Amino acid sequence: MDIEYDFSQGKRGAIEPTGEGKTRITIRLDDDILMWFREQVHLAGGGNYQTLINNALREYVQQRREPLEEILRRVVREELSQINMRATKGDRQK
């Protein structure tokens, strides 16, 4: 081991650059949640618990998005409701 080290060319920050489409953040998670994700990675024989957390968040978001079929049904119901209200209003005016 050297007695003196030269850090004049050293750089601060992450050792590995963040990949495209990724943002490095600091997040606070409950200990039991973090432990669960780390345990899942361990039981799977290795991997990255951060990727597992990202995948879990992505799955949650995708499940929360309203499917196109539901959007179309809602829009059709709203339009039919408007048509029925106009028709009912027209019948009253006669």
Image (cartoon, rainbow, N blue to C red):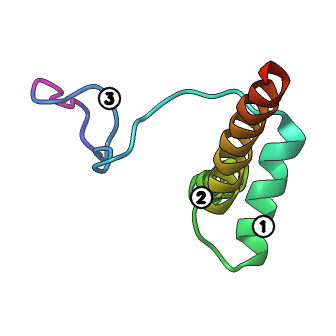
Checking the image for residue 40, the label placed there is: 1
From the viewer's perspective, is residue 23 above or below residue 60? above
Q: Nearer the viewer, mark 2 or mark 1?
A: 2
Q: Residues within 10 Å of mark 2 (few under 14, many from 20)?
A: few
- The residue range painted magenta reads 4-8
Q: Which residue is mark 2?
A: 68
Mark whose residue sits in front, 3 or 2: 2
Q: Disc 3 and disc 1: Cα gap in Å?
A: 29 Å
Mark 1 nearby-residue class (10 Å; few <14, some 14–19, many ≥20): some
The residue carrying mark 3 is 13
Secondary structure beneath label 2: helix
Sequence-wise first label, 2 or 1: 1
Is 19 situated left or right of 94 in this image?
left
State the residue lying farthest toward the top. Answer: 93
Residue type at mark 2: give it: Leu
Name the amino acid, label 1.
Answer: Gln
